[in-house]
């Protein structure tokens, strides 16, 4: 009985340690891509929501995406990053970076494939909002993404232009933000 308990605890610890990797794999298998006719947000927006949730669960501080269509548009719809591909790993890298730093204030981060500008939230507690984010072209694994004309970016543009529409309000409320 004790051995089984130890095994379960060890498996839970391993799953927690690799939660972002597991979530990234699971998202693509569980959710379909977004469609605009009919309006149906999909895996791309779940990735954004899960990214924020994963960085806020079980720890104090870290990085998150603010509740701003302007920021989401700037970060993910400028042919630099992909919502589905980059939201979770970018926040994980940002969180790992800020948790390993001691300088004050932290205004930017560089970790792995991602470079970004961040700002500490008003509530403090070591929580940082992503303000801008790009891929590091000098890093191994760099691959240019073409996202500007994708359905999720068209949805973001619609919500940026008309945030008070029913669809946009519903989408905003379905995402876990900072």
Image (cartoon, helix red, strand yellow):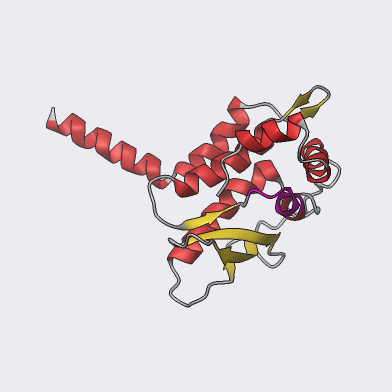
Q: Residue furthest front?
A: 164
Q: Residue furthest left?
A: 2
Viewer-proximal residue among 52 and 170: 170
Residue at point 64%, 48% (across, down): 67
Image quarter where the N terminus lies is top left
Give the side of residue 136 with respect to residue 157, left or right.
Answer: left
Q: Residue furthest bottom?
A: 103
**Quarter of the figure with residue 30:** top right
Residue at point 86%, 43% (across, down): 149
Q: Residue furthest right?
A: 149
List x then y, in percent, for residue 110. 59, 68
**Quarter of the figure with residue 39:** top right
Q: Relative to 121, does residue 7 appear above or below in the rendering? A: above
**Quarter of the figure with residue 119:** bottom right
Give the side of residue 134 with respect to residue 130, left or right.
Answer: right
Residue 37 visible to the viewer: yes
Q: Relative to 123, does residue 11 appear above or below in the rendering? A: above
List x then y, in percent, for residue 61. 44, 57
Q: Which region shows up in magenta?
A: 67-73
Viewer-proximal residue among 116 and 155: 155
Residue at point 82%, 44% (across, down): 157
Residue 113 visible to the viewer: no
Asked if residue 145 is among those painted magenta in the image, a careful observer would answer: no
Viewer-proximal residue among 59 and 31: 59
Majority secondary structure of magenta residues: helix
List x then y, in percent, for residue 111. 56, 64
Residue at point 20%, 37% (across, down): 6
């Amino acid at each position: 009985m004790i051995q089984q308990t130890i095994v379960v605890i060890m498996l839970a610890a391993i799953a927690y340690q690799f939660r972002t990797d597991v979530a990234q794999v699971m998202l693509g298998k569980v959710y379909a891509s977004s469609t605009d006719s009919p309006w149906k947000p999909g895996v791309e927006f779940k990735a954004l929501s899960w990214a924020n949730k994963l960085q806020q669960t079980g720890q104090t501080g870290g990085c998150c995406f603010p509740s701003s269509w302007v920021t989401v548009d700037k970060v993910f719809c400028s042919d630099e990053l992909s919502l589905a591909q980059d939201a979770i790993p970018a926040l994980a890298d940002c969180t790992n970076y800020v948790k390993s730093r001691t300088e004050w204030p932290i205004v930017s981060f560089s970790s792995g494939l991602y470079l970004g500008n961040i700002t500490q939230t008003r509530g403090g507690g070591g929580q940082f909002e992503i303000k801008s984010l790009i891929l590091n072209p000098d890093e191994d694994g760099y691959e240019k993404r073409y996202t500007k004309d994708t359905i999720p970016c068209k949805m973001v543009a619609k919500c940026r232009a008309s945030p008070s529409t029913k669809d946009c309000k519903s989408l905003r409320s379905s995402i876990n933000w900072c």
